[in-house]
Image (cartoon, rainbow, N blue to C red):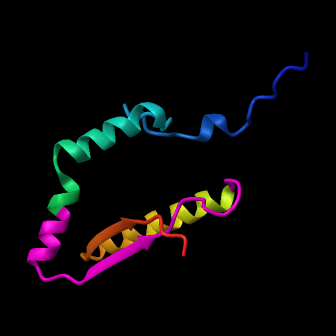
Amino acid sequence: RKKKVRNAYAPTIFLPETDFSQRAMAPKREPEIQAFWKDHNLYDKLSETAEKSGATRFVLHDGPPYANGDLHIGHALNKLLKDFINRKQILKGKQVHYVPGWDCH
């Protein structure tokens, strides 16, 4: 086996040592994050605060997840974009309501 060549610049890189993990560990962390939001009722608090301040309502009506044909990467992109849009509207202080729908007509 060929020996791995050492990076000549490695000794010049000084990164801080922290307890922060370099891995996302999404399968473990996502349920914790969801539980935090649910336990602290954050979604409702954000909505109530926006409503009390007279913020504009933003309603995103979503269609069926995959009504036409087999599931493909475009469906995932569609859901991601809708999630991004809702999050952006929340950050802008609007009352955001996501309405999932199943009407194919």
Q: Is residue 52 magenta?
A: yes
Instruction: Locate residue 86 relative to residue 65 in the image: left or right.
Output: left
Instruction: Locate residue 70 relative to residue 27 in the image: left or right.
Output: right
Q: Which residues are magenta?
A: 46-72
Question: Residue lying farthest top?
Answer: 1
Residue drawn at point x = 23 percent, y = 58 percent: 43
Front-lying residue, 78 or 33: 78
Q: Quadrant of residue 58?
A: bottom left
Which quarter of the rendering shows the C terminus? bottom right
Q: Is residue 10 magenta?
A: no
Front-lying residue, 76 or 36: 76
Residue 57 versus residue 73 in the image, above or below: below
In this orientation, does residue 25 appear? no
Position in image of residue 49 (x %, y %): 12, 69
Question: Residue lying farthest left?
Answer: 52
Position in image of residue 4 (x %, y %): 81, 24
Position in image of residue 19 (x %, y %): 37, 31
Front-lying residue, 91 or 49: 49
Residue drawn at point x = 27 percent, y = 39 percent: 35
Residue 59 versus residue 14 in the image, above or below: below
In this orientation, does residue 49 appear? yes
Q: Quadrant of residue 87?
A: bottom left
Question: Residue lying farthest right?
Answer: 1
Residue drawn at point x = 33 percent, y = 76 percent: 59
